[in-house]
Image (cartoon, rainbow, N blue to C red):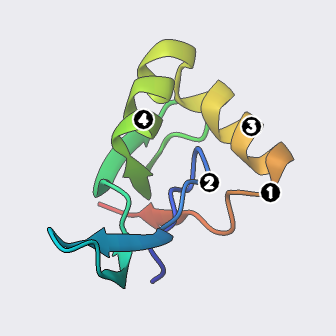
Amino acid sequence: MSKICQITGKKAITGNNVSHSKRRTKRKFNVNLFNKKFYWVEQDAWITLSVSANGLRTINKLGLDAAIKKAAEKGYLTEIKYLAF
């Protein structure tokens, strides 16, 4: 599973480690991702999303259904794992 937020589309970027002597070596800046379970009321199902901290704030602000629809329109949401209990 790649390190991409399914709500905001954020992914790892590359940059440089800069030492005291100003030598530069490549490094990655990873996303602050969480695998989180949500209860989707409209579908009456539990789903698991890989979401960044910013994605969690977006879900809290807009609501789960609106955030999922917006992410699907932008193409960030590739698949949703449904959990059956």
Badge 2 or badge 3: first in the primary sequence: 2
Residue drawn 19% across and 74% down? 21
Question: Residue beneath label 2, please?
Answer: 9
Q: Are marks 2 and 1 in contact (CB under 8 Å)?
A: yes
Asked if residue 71 is positioned above or below residue 61 in the image, the reply reads: below
Q: Name the residue under label 3.
A: 69
Q: Which of marks 4 and 2 is nearer the N terminus?
A: 2
Query: In front: mark 1 or mark 4?
Result: 4
Residue 75: numbered disc: 1
Dot placed on the residue nearer the N-terminal end, 3 or 1 = 3
Place residue 69 in its image quadrant. Answer: top right
* Foreground of the two, 31 or 37: 31
Q: Which residue is drawn at 19% across and 72% down?
A: 19
Q: Mark 4 points at which residue?
A: 54
Indicate which label's residue lies in the foreground, 2 or 3: 2
Residue 67 place in picture, x, y as percent: 62, 32
Question: Which residue occupies 38% across, 59% down?
Answer: 31
Q: In which quarter of the image is residue 80?
A: bottom right
